[in-house]
Amino acid sequence: MHGFRTLFFKEVLRFWKVSFQTVLAPLVSTLLYLLVFAQVMADHAEIYPGVSYAAFLIPGLVMMSMLQNAFANSSSSLVQSKVTGNIVFVLLAPLSPGEFYGAYVLASMVRGVLVGLVVFLAAWAFVEIPVREPLWAVVFGLLATILSGTLGVLAGIWAEKFDQMAVWQNFVILPLTFLSGAFYTLHSLPSFWAGLSRFNPFFYAIDGFRYGFLGNGDVSPWQSLLIVGGTCFALSWTTLALLRKGWRLRT
Amino acid sequence: MVPAIEIRGADKHYGSLHALKAVDLTVDSGDFFALLGPNGAGKTTLINLLSGLSRPDGGILKVMGHDVVRDYLQARRNLGVVPQELVFDPFFTVRETLKIQSGYFGLRKNDEWIDDLLHNLQLSDKAEANMRALSGGMKRRVLIAQALVHRPPVIVLDEPTAGVDVALRQSLWKFIQRLNREGHTILLTTHYLEEAETLCRRVAILRQGQIVADDTTENLLQSSASGKLEDVFVALMQDEDELAEP
Ligand SMILES: Nc1ncnc2c1ncn2[C@@H]1O[C@H](COP(=O)(O)OP(=O)(O)O)[C@@H](O)[C@H]1O
Ligand SMILES: [Mg+2]
C-alpha cells in the first residue's frame, strides 16, 4: 500500500513541479477559447431557455480541459519514463499491476480535476453559471478523468517514442474532444456528425457534466452514466489485463 | 540453505534470435559471483529475466527461493539491481530519488540508511542536487544506492564500473566487498577480467546464450597454463569459433 502511495505521490509531484506547463498553460488556453467563442456566439440563440451561450459553453470547456489534462498526465509520464529508461525503477519494485494502474490514473485524476477547478473558478469570475445538480457534475468529473487517465496509461504503455504519442493526441484525443459537443448541442449538428457523436463516450461525459450545472442535457444523465461508466470499466479491465501480461513494458 | 539465485532452463527468444538457451545457474547465499561473456552473450538478458524486466519463454528463475514470475513481489523485495544503462529521473534530486525508491519498497522511514548510503558512496554533498546536474560516475553511484535502499539480500550489478575512473572504481569495489562481508550475495558482470579474478569467488561465462564455464575462480585459473582469467576466457571463445554453427 505504501508503494502505491509513493508512486501516486511521485506522479503528482512530477506535474506539480512544472505546474506552469501543466496547470497554468491549460488554464490560459481554455480561457482564450472562452473569450473568443463567447464573444462570437454572444448573439446566438439561447440553447436552453434562460441560459446564456457562455454558461452553456463553460461546463463543456471545463470538461474538455479535464479530459485532455488527465490523458496528458499519465501518457506523457509513461512515455517519458520509457524513452529515458527510468521506467525500470517502477518495474523493479514490488508493485502489483493494480497498484501501478491505480497510481497513474489517480494522479491523472488529480491533475484533471485541478485544471478543471481552476478553469471553472476563473470563468465563474466573469460569467454567471448555475450549479443545479452538483452531484452529477462531481460524478461525471471523476468518471471522465478515470476514463481519460486510463486511455493515457494505455497510450503510454503502447507508445515507445514521443511521435507515437502525438498520433494518439492528434488522431484519438483531439477528434474525441472536439466531436463531443463541448461547443454546441447535438441538435445543431448535421445528422451524420450527430450520429457519429453518439458513439463518442466523451460526448456523454460532457453532456452529463453539463447537466450537473444547467439541469438540462441532450440525453438523460442516467444514460450518460451508463455509457461513461461502462467505457471506464471496459478500458480499465483491458489495461489491467495488459499490465498483468507485461505488454510492451516487460519485453 | 536455499540458494540466493537459482536458474533452471531459462530460455529467451527475441524474434529469430535465441538469446538464452536453457541456462542453468546457481548462486549460493553469501557468494561473490561474476557473470562474464563478450558483448551480446546474454548477460543483461539473464539479469532482466531475474529482475522481472523481461519475461522468460521457458524455465524457472528464483531469488531466495521465490519464483520471479509467480511470487514476483517477494522475489523483487529480495533483489537489488543496478542496471547497465545510466538511467535517472530528471525531475528529482538525489535524495528525492532515494526516498521515492524506498517508498516503492514500502519503506516509510529510511532516512538513516539513505544518509549511510550517500556517505559510503561519497554522495553526501550531492544529496540536494538535481539528478541532471551529476556526472556519469555520480549517476552510477546513485543507481547503486537506489538498488540498495531496501537492503536486499541479493545484489546484482550489471557492469557497475563501466565508464568509472580508476580511483572511484577502487572505492566502489571496497564498498561492494563490504556488503558481501555483511552477508549480501553479489552477482556482477564486468568487462574488466582482472577485477573478476581478484574479487569474485566464483565465475560463470556466457557465450551466445549458453553457459560454457561455471566454477570457482581458483579452479578456472588452475586450468590455464598462465594462471590468468583472460587466457581462460580467450580459450573458451576460440572453442566457440570451432563449434560455430554453419
Ligand atoms: N529487447 C531486445 N530486443 C531484441 N534483441 C535484444 C533485446 N535485448 C537484447 N537483445 C539481443 O540479445 C542478445 C543478448 O544481449 P544482452 O543480454 O544485452 O548481452 P550482454 O549483456 O551480454 O552484452 C544480443 O544479441 C542483443 O542484441
Ligand atoms: Mg549487458
Image (tube, rainbow, N blue to C red):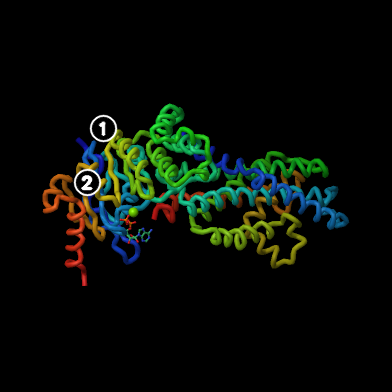
The chain that hosts pointer 2 is: B
Q: Which residue is mark 1?
A: B181
Q: Residue at x 58, y 46 (%)?
A: A146
Taking A185 as reference, is B189 above or below it?
Answer: above
In this rendering, would A235 be left or right of A94?
right
Which residue is depicted at the point 69% across and 45% down? Answer: A24
How many residues crowd mark 2 within 10 Å: few (<14), some (14–19), many (20+)? some
Where residue B24 appears, x then y in whole percent?
21, 51
From the viewer's side, name the closer residue of A231 and B229.
B229
N-terminal label among 2 and 1: 1
Q: Residue at x 31, y 64 (%)?
A: B17
Q: Which residue is mark 2?
A: B197
Name the quarter showing ligand 2: bottom left
Q: What quarter of the picture does the C terminus of chain A occupy?
A: bottom left
Residue B129's place in the image compared with A81, above or below, is above
**In percent of the image, x 72 and y 66: which residue is there?**
A191
